[in-house]
Image (spheres, rainbow, N blue to C red):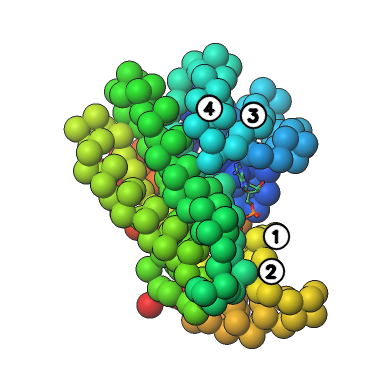
Amino acid sequence: MNGQLLQGKTAIVTGAASGMGKAIARLFANQGAKVVLADLNKAAAEQAVQELPEGRGHAVQTDVADDQSVAAMIHETITTFGSIDVLVNCAGVPQAFTPIEELSLEQWDKIMSVNTKSIYLTTRHAVPHMKAGGKGSMINIASIAGIRARPGLNAYCASKGAAIMLSKALAIELAPFQIRVNVINPGPAETPMLGKFINGDEAEVEAGKRDIFISSVPLGALIQPEDIAEAALYLASDLSKIVTGEVMNVDGGRGI
Ligand SMILES: NC(=O)c1ccc[n+]([C@@H]2O[C@H](COP(=O)([O-])OP(=O)(O)OC[C@H]3O[C@@H](n4cnc5c(N)ncnc54)[C@H](O)[C@@H]3O)[C@@H](O)[C@H]2O)c1
């Protein structure tokens, strides 16, 4: 899809080296945005930039769970592109199905840090620039697991539920500044992450994708990264200028 819905806007997409974040960065750049691709995986983020139109992408190695790393990424965005109009928090980590008594403190802390604390960190550093610009759009990629639980995904469900409520709290706090905050809840999606929710060898992972995930989607198919990118484009652009605090399930009906 080519067009100009984001002409003149600068967007940050975290987790942009893979899966949904990469698809969002590509669609935003094709819609005229300048995009910072912020990801832990520097080589893959730089490769993703190569696939964008000339001058539309800039890779910044970032650990979204680290305050200094996020502050440096926001600073580099401003020095490179001059403003922040759109912030997409897409970076995340999965959880392999784990009974709660076997979940280590380290696993809990990592999932909460990358999936939830990261939104606090990117927001606190980006918001002063959005306030200075007089408006902005934040899109937080949570999960259908944030509103519909599954056994053994205890920390992951908690991290995404918290991300959803944090987004609503930010939406009401930032509305007077014309900064909109919305959530996309993907259902099971065809990205490198999906297999990592399943404990097992390659055959068990493939069977699990079919038996656990596809069978849980009423529309009968895995969600594609491009489906999420198209929802993010709506929320990033002025098409959704009166929409804030919304939680959009892009999940083939999994959340019904
Ligand atoms: N795949 C699914 O089925 C699914 C379903 C619902 C929600 N989600 C959520 O969607 C988002 C994108 O997932 P995806 O499926 O595209 O995953 P993915 O594994 O393809 O991509 C995740 C990206 O995040 C990056 N990342 C991980 N930790 C990071 C950190 N600390 N700092 C910076 N970058 C980091 C990785 O390097 C990777 O490029 C995640 O938040 C995920 O929880 C995924």
Measured from the top left, where is residue 107 in percent x and y? 57, 59
The vertical placement of 22 against 29, above or below, is below
Q: What residue type is labelled 2?
A: Gly
Q: Residue at label 4?
A: 68
Label 4 or label 1, whichever lies nearer to me, is 4
Q: Look at 48% across and 42% down and name the residue there.
A: 118
Q: Which amino acid does label 1 sit on?
A: Pro
Q: Nearer the viewer, residue 160 or 29?
A: 160
Q: Which of marks 3 and 1 is nearer the N terminus?
A: 3
Quadrant (top left, top right, bottom left, bottom right) of the C terminus: bottom left
Q: Which mark is residue 195?
A: 2
- Say whether mark 1 is within 8 Å of ligand 1: yes
The residues bearing labels 1 and 2 have C-alpha atoms spaced at a distance of 7 Å
Q: Which amino acid does label 3 sit on?
A: Val
Asked if the residue at tag 2 contacts the one at tag 1, i.e. Cβ–Cβ closer than 8 Å, the answer is: yes
Measured from the top left, where is residue 37 in percent x and y? 62, 35
Q: Residue 60 carries which label?
A: 3
Q: Earlier in the sequence, mark 4 or mark 3?
A: 3
